[in-house]
Image: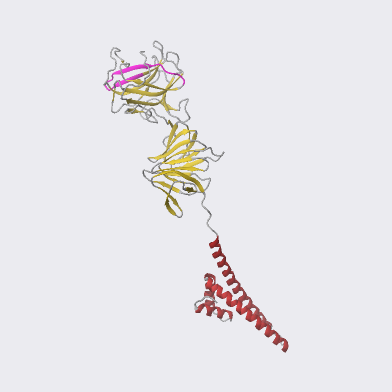
Amino acid sequence: MSEPLNKDVDAAIMAYLVGDIEDADLAELDRRVREDPAAARRMAQLCDHEMALATMLNMRQGRQISARSKPVPKKLQRATRRTSQSRLWMAAVAALIVIGVAWVALHNSSVKPAPATRVATVTEIAGTVEVNRPDGKSALKLKAPLNAGDRIAVGAQSRLALSFDDGTTLTLDAGTTLALPSAADQPLHLESGALTASVAHQPAGKPLRIHTAQAEAEIVGTQFRLAIENNATRLDVSEGRVRLTRAADKAVALVDAGFATVATGGTEAPLYLRRLQTLADGLPAQSKVLVGSTAPWSGWEGDVSAPPGTPAGTLAIGSHLPQPGTRFYGEIRSPLFSPEVPSGDHTYLRFRYRADDFKPGDLIKFMLKKKDGTIFHGFLKPEVGNWTVATVRFDGAFLNLGDHALPMKPGESLNQCVFLGAAPDGELARTGPKLWLDDVIVFSAPGDIPVSKLESN
């Protein structure tokens, strides 16, 4: 039984079949047949009936004509063929539409969407973490799968750890937003916050890539931390090496284990490296840093460049120019301390240095200056050819430059420190020796700590 239709549609189909339909009605019927599956089925059904009746009539007419032996005029034959062909074409169109509609319905009901590609698994979760997918947002749970294209948002006071199939692990700090790549050749996108990673060794030519607004990191296999802070991307590498490319100008830094670099959105500063472990780390409890050097040595006077014995791109401050007629090599001057630093039995100067081409008897000289021009000085016998950390105490070992009988007393207020290389007493400075500093701090401690021995001359 046919489906109920608007009577106008049935009337239009019948008018078409008998050849008595206006052009406008034919166009409307054609539209209905193409857009309405029920109209298409009805068209096919009536065309089938009409063609069956036409066949029977033609057979009867053929017998009658044969009996009277009167041929059918050719003009009528051609008109009949045209009408028959037209009706066959319309029926075929309707039948194809019915078949197409049925196939689409069957295909939609039987074909399921391709399953999501799992790329990682939640191994640790604390607080609220959401994942955003095409079908909406949902809260993540422990052991939940993470799929290609997922966007992860870690809430405040929350934390997430996830593991990839190759053994790579990521830990996302509170407030971090990370988008997983939708394809294997795309990078992860760190939108905000910070992550710490331990990356399994990657296939040749296929490093793990993490993109931020300021830079892109390429990792073959290492441990590092990547953070977005104050519109800049900071990379700290604790194991292996990471290649960081700044987005603004494609400047590249190769960051080795134990070093860090910062990429901003501009190009005004080089991608310099700084040691990951600073001299302020590991101080005794209740210590207080009073003065700290900051890369790239703003305010210091000296030669800022990449020193030997550190990765390319590391900036330190050095001096290697002799001062003619004296026993001293060029100075490295600290900025003025603001506020001034009080001396005392428990106030210390700690610095990391490298002395190259120093001969036996050469020394490192310190000059601690007061605001009124008073200078206290002391000497240190250096280790040569390696980066070394030294710690000295602001106490009686520093002597008044004008009167050695007046050693520094606790409570003196100092506003600057100067480092020099010094030839042995009685000799003049020569070309060759180099002194480098790459970290300097002044700090107070709650008690005595081990110090380097100062020389009297």
Quadrant for the N terminus, please: bottom right
Q: Up-down: is 65 above or below 297?
A: below
Decide whether residue 384 is among the magenta residues: yes
Please identify the quarter of the rendering in which residue 34 is found. Answer: bottom right
Q: Residue furthest bottom?
A: 68
Residue displayed at 46% across by 22% down: 386
**Would residue 354 be found to the left or right of residue 81 on screen?**
left
> Is any part of residue 75 visible from this angle?
no
The boundaries of the magenta stretch are: 366-385
- Looking at the image, which residue sits at the far front? 142
Q: What is the x, y in percent for residue 332?
A: 38, 23
Q: Residue at x 59, y 71 (%)?
A: 95
* The C terminus: image quadrant: top left
**Residue that appears at 70% across and 87% down:** 64
- Residue 404: x and y in percent read 30, 12
Image position of 244 with respect to 413: above or below: below
